[in-house]
Image (cartoon, rainbow, N blue to C red):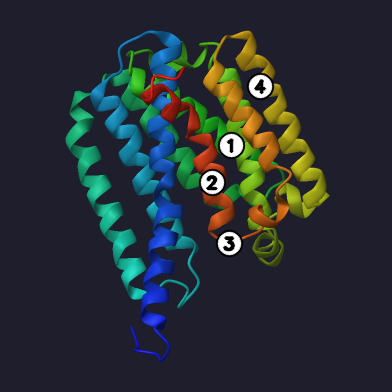
Amino acid sequence: MERQPGGSIQRAGASTAARLLHYWWPVALGWSVSLVVGRATGLPLSSAGRGVLLLSIWAAYSFDRLMDATPGGLSRGLAASLWAGFATAAAGILVLLPRLPIGTLALLLLLSVAGLGYRRVKGYPLVKAVLVPGVWTWAGIALPLADGSWIGWRALVHPVSVPLFLLISAGTLLCDVNDVDRDREQGVRSLPVQVGVARTLALAAMLAAAGVLVAFRLARIGLALDGILLVLLSGCRPLLARETWGPLAVDMVLTVPGLLILAHLV
């Protein structure tokens, strides 16, 4: 890194730290989802399954950021951190794989194919809005439980999957607001590109509100509070439009249910 006047090395370091926090916060979100699943189902969680979930999120988000980066878009330190994170997570997954049942391994293979295929199909309308929350919900429920059912179908039909899908769908749309200019330039037909930011925010608020209603019906107070926060966040367009901080705010809000469980507040 070149030394520039005015303390820019410190600012660059802070920027790198903020971007890594944004890129890797989904690991905390995965941890939160696993806590919600354990509380909602009352079933014991598999340490190997939860470990694979968190490591897979770490690996996937590190690799995706590396592949999406434009030439010169990542500093040397940030790129090295992402590669190190990807390699560490991949190694951890290999260690844990033998401890998973065959049915869960089949699910992991299916999710890997979906992840690799996402880069090819994300330019189609609504793919990101449906595929991302679908994969998150499926993996977030089935991997921590690792009940051995084929591709995790038994875990997926649990009622908690409905509010989780609705809330993660709302969060995905809110994160798309930050990417609207880049998506438009790259020909990615995300919902904000197709219908505009205002309508996307309205749809996200409606999905979050639906999640609140379902969560209350299931007596999942933490998820209901999370949905309320997402509805409020959908009205904060200037924050959502900020690079790094907008998507990070969404992910942090989605992590609230796990924090409430950890604090024994729900």
Disc 3 marks which residue?
A: 243
Task: Please tell me which residue is depicted at 43% across the width and 10% down the height of the picture.
Answer: 41
Q: Nearer the viewer, mark 2 or mark 3?
A: 3
Disc 1 marks which residue?
A: 131
**Label 3 – label 4 distance at C-alpha:** 28 Å
Kindly identify the amino acid type of the residue bearing the numbered disc 4: Val
Disc number placed over residue 212 in the picture, else none: 4
Kindly identify the amino acid type of the residue bearing the numbered disc 3: Glu
Disc 2 marks which residue?
A: 118
Residue 104 relative to residue 217: left or right: left
N-terminal-most mark, 3 or 1: 1
Crowd rating for badge 2 (residues with CA inside 10 Å; few <14, some 14–19, many 20+):
some
N-terminal-most mark, 4 or 1: 1
Name the one closer to the observer, 96 or 116. Answer: 96
| Residue 251 x, y percent position in the rendering | 52, 42
Crowd rating for badge 4 (residues with CA inside 10 Å; few <14, some 14–19, many 20+):
many
| Residue 249 x, y percent position in the rendering | 55, 47
**Label 2 – label 1 distance at C-alpha:** 8 Å
N-terminal-most mark, 2 or 3: 2
Crowd rating for badge 3 (residues with CA inside 10 Å; few <14, some 14–19, many 20+):
some
Task: Please tell me which residue is depicted at 37% across the width and 31% down the height of the picture.
Answer: 108
Name the one closer to the observer, 196 or 189. Answer: 196
In this rendering, the answer to whether 73 lies above or below 8 is above
In this rendering, the answer to whether 138 lies above or below 184 is above
Kindly identify the amino acid type of the residue bearing the numbered disc 1: Leu
Task: Please tell me which residue is depicted at 58% across the width and 33% down the height of the picture.
Answer: 168
**Label 4 – label 1 distance at C-alpha:** 21 Å
Residue 69 relative to residue 46: left or right: right
N-terminal-most mark, 2 or 4: 2
N-terminal-most mark, 3 or 4: 4
Q: Given contact means CB atoms under 8 Å apart, are the residues at marks 4 and 1 in contact? A: no
Secondary element under disc 3, as helix, strand or loop, is loop
